[in-house]
Image (spheres, rainbow, N blue to C red):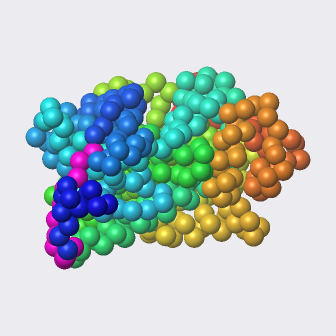
């Protein structure tokens, strides 16, 4: 300490409005994903003090629109702090002029990866070759935690009379599972819209197969549009099918929009009418999330949380983050037997049939099987 004083002298007294700067460095490790708007990398972040942590860094293509979009995402994410939202860490411009946002790194998989792990990927279900389905309680827990994130964002007070943020891109790739801790994390607020802001009305944003009808028709959107998108995610996790996607979906945006609008003209087949063994209550909740008219859906994420919570914890206990972590570990190790601790955390499952508690049988109902045979979407009632 005497040496430091001789070298630098005594530091000035800390006072209100004192400013200082620091600098972190990033080393890219591996690319996590790439899309039309940019790419995401796993990276090592080293602080000015020499401390290193693993992070995810998102870059956008160098266009004025892209940079403005990423800057807006950074601003939104920097304000949001929730257990079920990927945490913002930093943002800026690198030496080459690329705008970036650094976020906490989630060690695990997204929901597309979860479906593939279960053997209910799109390529298999449309051939009726799925391995097994996800237990309803696990699906319900993932939905419950995602709803918590949406409730927080939908009700966040940004100040100045601005309250609420619509995500607009709720989809399997943007819902991440922390396998070690069992946390569910909602990511990518890049195209989120402030509730009540009319500037983005009429603009199509997000992934077409997960868009609410009002988004596709250019009508005003609100928090219920996110609930519809989550309903599609839940339907897929329960059954393997998206009721708005045909077996051979169009690759063009216009073609995909046309397919969805045509699908909406047919009645939806509830999940329990598509696969044998699915609990009718979670099927009912899913169908309500997916009502075509916004006013027929849940009025808010909080209202959906009430119904889903009652379903999950109706016996006085239900899934927890530990349950999800234990479940994923068993799913990754088919020959592993649950430890007493895992058996207890997953006691809400039906263990009377042994391994099928973790891997329930995926069996199409006769009506759904007939549709798959005809290469039709069994998520809709086809004449």
User: Is 170 on the left-hand or right-hand side of 330?
Assistant: left
At horizontal 28% and vertical 61% (from top left) the residue drawn is 2
Percent x, y for residue 337? Answer: 82, 38
Whether residue 9 sits left or right of residue 341 in the image: it is: left
- 172 vs 34, left or right, is right
Q: At 47% from the left edge and 31% from the top edge, which residue is drawn?
A: 246
Quadrant of the frame with the N terminus: bottom left
Q: Is residue 102 magenta?
A: no
Range of magenta residues:
14-24
Query: Is 119 placed left or right of 78 in the picture?
Result: right
Report the residue at 75% width, 31% height from top: 334
x, y percentage for residue 200? 20, 55
**Number of marks in the rendered image:** 0
Q: Residue at x 48, y 57 (%)?
A: 84
- Residue toward you, 15 or 34: 15
x and y, in percent, of residue 144 in the image? 56, 59
Q: Main secondary structure of the magenta part?
A: loop
């Amino acid at each position: 300490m005497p040496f430091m004083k001789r070298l630098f002298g005594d530091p000035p007294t800390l006072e209100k409005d004192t400013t200082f700067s620091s600098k972190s460095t990033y080393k890219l490790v591996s690319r996590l994903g790439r899309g039309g708007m940019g790419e995401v990398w796993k990276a090592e972040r080293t602080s000015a003090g020499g401390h290193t942590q693993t992070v995810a860094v998102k870059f956008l293509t160098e266009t004025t629109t892209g940079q403005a979009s990423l800057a807006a995402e950074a601003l939104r994410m920097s304000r949001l702090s929730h257990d079920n939202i990927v945490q913002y860490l930093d943002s800026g411009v690198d030496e080459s002029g690329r705008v970036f946002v650094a976020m906490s790194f989630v060690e695990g998989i997204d929901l597309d990866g979860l479906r593939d792990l279960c053997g209910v990927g799109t390529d298999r279900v449309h051939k009726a070759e799925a391995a097994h389905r996800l237990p309803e309680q696990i699906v319900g827990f993932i939905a419950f935690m995602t709803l918590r994130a949406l409730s927080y964002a939908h009700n966040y007070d940004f100040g100045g009379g601005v309250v609420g943020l619509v995500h607009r891109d709720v989809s399997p790739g943007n819902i991440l599972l922390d396998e070690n801790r069992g946390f569910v994390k909602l990511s990518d607020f890049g195209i989120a819209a402030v509730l009540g802001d009319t500037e983005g009305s009429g603009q199509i944003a997000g992934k077409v197969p997960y868009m609410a009808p009002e988004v596709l028709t250019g009508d005003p959107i609100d928090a219920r549009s996110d609930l519809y998108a989550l309903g599609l995610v839940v339907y897929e996790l329960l059954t393997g099918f998206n009721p708005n996607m045909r077996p051979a979906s169009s690759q063009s945006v216009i073609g995909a929009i046309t397919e969805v609008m045509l699908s909406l003209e047919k009645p939806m087949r509830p999940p329990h009418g598509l696969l044998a063994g699915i609990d009718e209550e979670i099927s009912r909740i899913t169908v309500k999330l997916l009502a075509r008219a916004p006013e027929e859906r849940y009025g808010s994420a909080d209202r959906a949380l009430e119904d889903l919570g009652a379903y999950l914890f109706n016996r006085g206990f239900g899934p927890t983050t530990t349950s999800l972590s234990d479940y994923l570990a068993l799913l990754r190790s088919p020959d592993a037997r649950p430890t007493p601790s895992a058996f207890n955390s997953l006691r809400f499952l039906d263990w009377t049939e042994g391994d099928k508690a973790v891997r329930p049988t995926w069996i199409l109902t006769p009506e759904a099987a007939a549709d798959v045979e005809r290469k039709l979407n069994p998520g809709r009632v086809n004449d």
